Image (cartoon, rainbow, N blue to C red):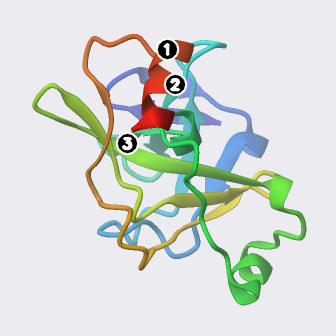
Amino acid sequence: MEVRTSRFGVVNIEDDRIITFPKGLLGFPDCKQFCLLEPGNDACFFWLQSVDDATLAFVVTDPSLFVPDYTVPMRPDQAEELGITKAEDAQIFCIVNKVGDQLTGNLQGPLVINTMNRTGEQFVLADRRWTTRHNLVKVGERVTRETEAKAMSA
């Protein structure tokens, strides 16, 4: 499938790489199909590109790389709706923003994706430990084991 993007031009994506968010994302209820664009094999940041709107893409990451104790509680009805039967079938991402010299992640609104059937949903967490702009890393700081150790001790 050819996916038109405003950042990368036309990108060829296999149909089985399309992720469907039946409810869309918060603020974008009409955009339901996305694909993950990986800048490299060892990248920790990805583009979540809308298939429905070439101008809509989000930088996302696995929040556990930066916040090791981050977990997303899932009710049985949520797991059933996404078709998740085993925890390891769920991949968690957060949307990343740049605020000043800091990269922040929306840990209050994680994206939960069933890696088996490629469906996802943006959850809204009530846990006050997590914010929509949770500090992840300073811009220019390399993400290394040292960075991860610092994040774990904070």
Q: Position of residue 7 (x, y in %)?
A: 33, 25
99 sits left or right of 97 in the view: left
| Residue at left offset 51%, top offset 63% | 32
Question: Whole-percent x and y of residue 133?
Answer: 26, 51
> Which circle, 1 or 3, is nearer the viewer?
1
**Could you tell me how far apart the alpha carbons at marks 1 and 2 are, in whole angstroms?**
5 Å
Q: Is residue 62 above or below residue 8?
A: below
Q: Is residue 10 visible?
A: no
Please indicate whether residue 27 sits to the left or right of residue 126 in the image.
Answer: left
Element type where label 2 sits in the image:
helix
In the image, 79 versus 133, the foreground residue is 133
Pointer 2: what residue? 149
User: Mark 1–mark 3 contact, CB under 8 Å?
Assistant: no
Residue at the image point whose x is 32% and y is 13% from the top: 141
For the view shown, which residue lies furthest in the bottom direction?
77
Q: Which mark is residue 146?
A: 1
Side (left or right) of 15 relative to 110: right
Q: CA distance from mark 2 to mark 3?
A: 27 Å
Badge 3 amino acid? Phe
**Callouts 2 and 3 close, C-beta under 8 Å:** no
Q: Where residue 144 appears, x then y in whole percent? A: 51, 13
Among numbered discs 1 and 3, the one appearing first in the sequence:
3
- Local packing at callout 3 (Cα closer than 10 Å; few below 14, some 14-19, many 20+) is some
Q: Is residue 23 above or below residue 154?
A: below
Provide residue 104's location: percent of width, then percent of height: 29, 41
- Quadrant of the image containing the N terminus: top right
Q: Kindly state the secondary structure of the residue where label 3 is placed.
A: strand
Q: Mark 1 falls on what kind of element?
A: helix
* Dots 1, 2 in contact, CB < 8 A: yes
Compared to residue 106, the image places residue 135 above or below, namely above
Q: Which residue is mark 3?
A: 58
